[in-house]
Image (tube, rainbow, N blue to C red):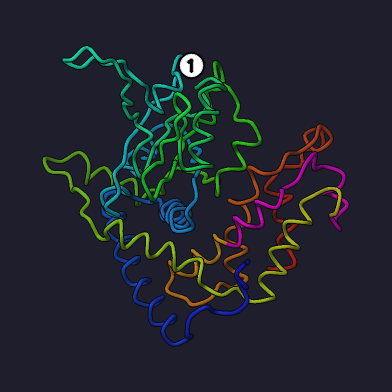
Amino acid sequence: MQEDVRTPVVSTEAAVAEVEALGKRLAEVRRRIGEVIFGQHQVVEETLITLLAGGHALLIGVPGLAKTRLVETLGQVLGLSAKRVQFTPDLMPADILGSEVLEESESGRRSFRFIQGPVFCQLLMADEINRASPRTQSALLQSMQEREVSVGGVRHPLPHPFHVLATQNPLEQEGTYPLPEAQLDRFLLQIDVTYPDLAAEREMLLATTGAFERKPSEAMSWSDFEAAQRLVRRIPVGEKIMDAILTLVRDGRPETSQYEEVRKHVAWGPGPRASQALMLAVRARALLDGRFAPSADDVLALAAPVLRHRMALNFSARAEGVTMPSIIRLLCQPLA
């Protein structure tokens, strides 16, 4: 039976106190991340929202913007086991998932033993994911969706929680395999990583080129973080916010949109998973700020990260100079 998201499942006073207390702990998490990651406040916020909502994130940015360092820092601050895999064209599924090896005992009996791959962790960084072959990408897709892997016909559950933070370089596209729409849809948010401002870059230079470099410290255990993920799903969502989410997503589909620009320029729009992602993300953002319920501002802030990888423009849009950000701004106008 589905939970009614419009009514709290716990007493209001107890839930508010729990949200406020957790909001303070998450503020400390952000502070400690900010000690080693400079000038990427929005990226850090959207990544934490993704993890709190129990999803995966696709980080897109040029090299050198601290994407790898962000994943390492998150693992240390949240008490999660983190691993990194560099995706290359010759990477095989077994290099990620693991493989079975044949062993022979002293009595001469032979048996297979499964050796776990790097996917058996709580926080996996898939670096330059679009450089791997479709076969390897599909192996990772099963891990992301089912939270388990199948090797030799045997299913092996992954650790809990399990999150994939994949990176992609928007510049070099030679020798890459574009991610299929089905896999893109599995990412809760697409996070665009931009250059830091002048003040942040100056601070980074001073902090990272001296004799000593600050190391992040744990601010929350993985069990506490799991409790926060469970709390996200208990945060109530008002009827107006739910209607705003549904209207926003459905207006992004050319078949049901009220906007002529969408019907004319969008090839395909977001599916129901976009509504689910936005619902979870606005709850997580409210919790991150220590608020008991999400607002229209949360929907506005997360519309672009949720929608931009779940929609595609047609040839007419590209010919007329229409961009995805302009389409998303149009969809957000009623909420502004």
Which residue is rendered at x = 73% and y = 62% of the image? 246
Callout 1 amino acid: Pro
Majority secondary structure of the magenta segment?
Answer: helix
Q: Position of residue 69 (x, y in %)?
A: 32, 41
Query: Which of these two is toward me, 182 or 192?
Result: 182
Q: Position of residue 172 (x, y in %)?
A: 52, 23
Q: Position of residue 2 (x, y in %)?
A: 63, 66
Q: Residue furthest left?
A: 211
Q: Residue furthest bottom?
A: 13
Where disc 1 sits, the SS reads loop
Residue 250 in the figure: left or right of residue 87: right
Which residue is rendered at x = 57% and y = 66% of the image? 298
In terms of image quadrants, where is residue 251? bottom right
Above or below 260: residue 248: below
Query: Which of these two is toward me, 174 or 146?
Result: 146
Q: Position of residue 190 (x, y in %)?
A: 55, 45
Residue receiving disc 1: 89
Which residue is rendered at x = 41% and y = 49% of the image? 197
Query: Which of these two is toward me, 213 or 280?
Result: 280
Crowding at mark 1 (Cα within 10 Å: few <14, some 14-19, many 20+): some
Which residue is rendered at x = 26% and y = 58% of the image? 221
Above or below 245: residue 33: above
Residue 336 in the figure: left or right of residue 11: right
What range of the chain is rendered magenta?
257-279
